[in-house]
Image (cartoon, coloured by chain):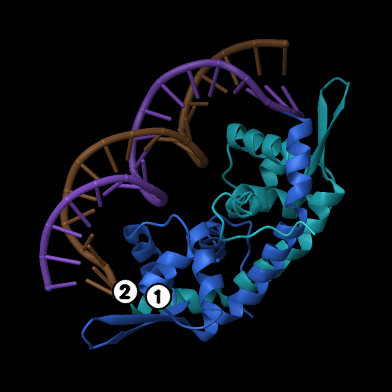
Chain colours: A cyan, B blue, C brown, D purple
Amino acid sequence: MDTGDVFDPNCPTRVVLDRIGDKWSVLVLLSLSDGPMRFTALRDRIGGVTPKVLTQTLRTMEHDGLISRKIFAEVPPRVEYALTDLGGSLHGPIAVVATWAEQNVSKILESRELSA
Amino acid sequence: MDTGDVFDPNCPTRVVLDRIGDKWSVLVLLSLSDGPMRFTALRDRIGGVTPKVLTQTLRTMEHDGLISRKIFAEVPPRVEYALTDLGGSLHGPIAVVATWAEQNVSKILESRELSA
DNA sequence: CCGTATCCCTCAGGATACTG
DNA sequence: CAGTATCCTGAGGGATACGG
């Protein structure tokens, strides 16, 4: 089995961490887990993201096979983004982290206060 | 319950994602999950990290209450880092992601090849 | 052994404005 | 509607060298 070693700097496993480290990617993934969405819908749902950055994020995720991009030849133009099977499979692990974050962030903040 | 909203840019939940996004933090956490380690041991185990950056990482994690720092007044000096309970509780979620990464990184790379 | 002190430097991310 | 195009910035990462 192709299991890779996270400690090896040359190991591509790192790319996954990079992707998860990117806040926008995570938010896109969580958004799309409710179903396909259009560009503007994503833009509105995710606060504070500029179109350029959103486009970058979407392109990278598409490139990595995490999401799909479907263009409808209509007027006005319409583009829908959706999770691929691969992207969907990442939702679970991310949700686990997100849950931990929501439950423990107060402890972290508390700790920061103390050592301020 | 203090559950926080990941979609709110002002929500401190983001800090957790930032920490996980930091490759060094993750590697430190995974290293320490085997037990306490000294500075040099961490430095050696984690490839390609400079002392400055390692120190920064350790300080931040200590500040956030994820790890503890214990100084032994000896000659030569000795410092041991260990996971706190909070830090230990983060190991599970991170391990889930790491496992996913190791198992799926090949699919991502494959997808990248195709759309190259 | 365990870090600090400097300096550099790039580069991802954002603001803003515009187009097919 | 769904993006590009352009410019800018500053914060963090790394290399190197030195100190308690």
Amino acid carrying mark 1 in the image: Glu
Above-or-below relation of D14 to A5: above
Specify the farthest residue to the bottom.
Answer: B73
Amino acid carrying mark 2 in the image: Ala
Which quarter of the figure is the N terminus of chain B placed in?
bottom right
| SS at circle 2 | loop
Residue position marked by numbered label 1 in the rendering: B62
Query: What residue lies at 57% left-to-right and 49% top-to-bottom?
Result: A10
Q: How many marks?
A: 2
Question: Residue A68 or A110: which is nearer the viewer?
Answer: A68
Residue B29, horizontal then vertical, whole percent: 53, 72
Above-or-below relation of A23 to A80: below
Dot 1 crowding, Cα within 10 Å, few <14, some 14–19, many 20+? many
Dot 2 crowding, Cα within 10 Å, few <14, some 14–19, many 20+? few
Report if residue B44 is visible in the image: yes
Question: Residue B71 or A84: which is nearer the viewer?
Answer: B71
Residue B74, horizontal then vertical, whole percent: 23, 88
Q: What is the chain letter for disc 1?
A: B
Q: Nearer the viewer, mark 1 or mark 2?
A: 1
Above-or-below relation of B43 to A77: below
Q: Quadrant of residue B5?
A: bottom right
Above-or-below relation of A23 to B94: above
Report if residue B22 is visible in the image: no
| SS at circle 1 | helix
Query: What residue lies at 65% left-to-right and 54% top-to-bottom?
Result: A13
Q: Quadrant of residue A59?
A: top right
Residue at mark 1 shares a chain with residue at mark 2: no
Query: Do tag 1 and tag 2 residues touch (Cβ < 8 Å)?
Result: no
Residue A43, horizontal then vertical, whole percent: 67, 40
Q: Is residue B38 left or right of residue B14?
A: left
Residue position marked by numbered label 2 in the rendering: A116
